[in-house]
Amino acid sequence: MGLMQKTAIIVPCYNESERLITKEFIRYAGKNKWVYFIFVNDGSSDDTFEIINYMCHCNSEQMLCVDLKINVGKAEAVRQGFLKTIDSGFYNIGYWDADLATPLNAIDKLCALLEGKRVIAAIGSRVKLLGYRIERKPLRHYLGRVFATCASCVLGLPIYDTQCGAKIFKNNSDLKKVFSTPFIVKWIFDVEILARVETILQNKGVGSLEEYALEYPLKEWTHIGGSKVKILDFLLGAIELFKIYRTYK
């Protein structure tokens, strides 16, 4: 396991048969025995379940399939993955997009941040810098920046990127509270997770998430074709952002 702590990564999967790169998951797990993958099949209607089963057969010690018989949406699929994992003795638990827009080697970087005593959340951030390979469609980038700024204002946190599908948390009793009840939103559950963590910390009187979370500028992130996120979802996201503000703030 090296210097890294035992870490579980939840991978929500809905009709991902054309985008799951099985060899990458198998290769990474083989080289990093401290990382465990929990694939959540979200009621897929294609061959996703069979593909996940194949990967788990290749490395049953580090890969597990959670099969949801009906499609419940990404937010609930991620939550179910956490609920299945949170009492299993993992030091860190996170979630990752199945299409590997964020390469798996970034898991190492985020977990390294969690080695800090006060750090409870490590968040991948798509910051386009010189020497970094962040490939996003221009319209999505600019809409994303507007949304991220609004989300930052709602949360009251100076966070650059709430929607990147690469986040890892220290596993503790507070994390269990975060995922104990269904989310009130379906699309921007990332924002609601952070809102719940912030609320828990403030209720305990120990400060703000700003003191306990770190964003990591990803070296590489690539838009993968076939994404289920549409432009209309940004409008729906604005409505959900208001729901989060009304509920938590």
Image (cartoon, rainbow, N blue to C red):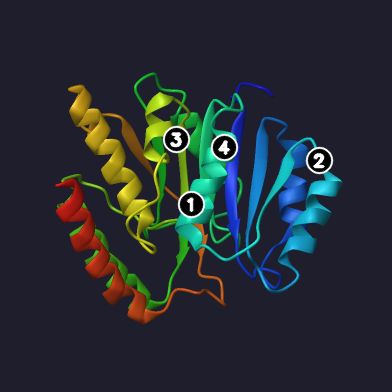
Instruction: Quote the CA–CA distance across marks 3 and 2.
Output: 24 Å
Residue to which mark 1 is pinned: 219
Report whether 154 appears left or right of 106. Answer: left
Q: Which mark is residue 169?
A: 3
Report whether 128 appears left or right of 57. Answer: left
Residue to which mark 2 is pinned: 60
- Determine contact: label 1, label 3, CB under 8 Å: no
Residue at left 14%, top 47%? Answer: 249
Residue at left 44%, top 25%? Answer: 172
Query: Of label 4 and label 3, which has the lower sequence position?
Result: 4
Which quadrant holds residue 6? Answer: top right
Instruction: Quote the CA–CA distance across marks 4 and 2.
Output: 21 Å
Residue 179 at x, y percent in the picture: 42, 41
Amino acid carrying mark 1 in the image: Lys
Instruction: Quote the CA–CA distance across marks 1 and 2.
Output: 30 Å
Q: Secondary structure at mark 4?
A: helix
Residue 144 at x, y percent in the picture: 31, 68
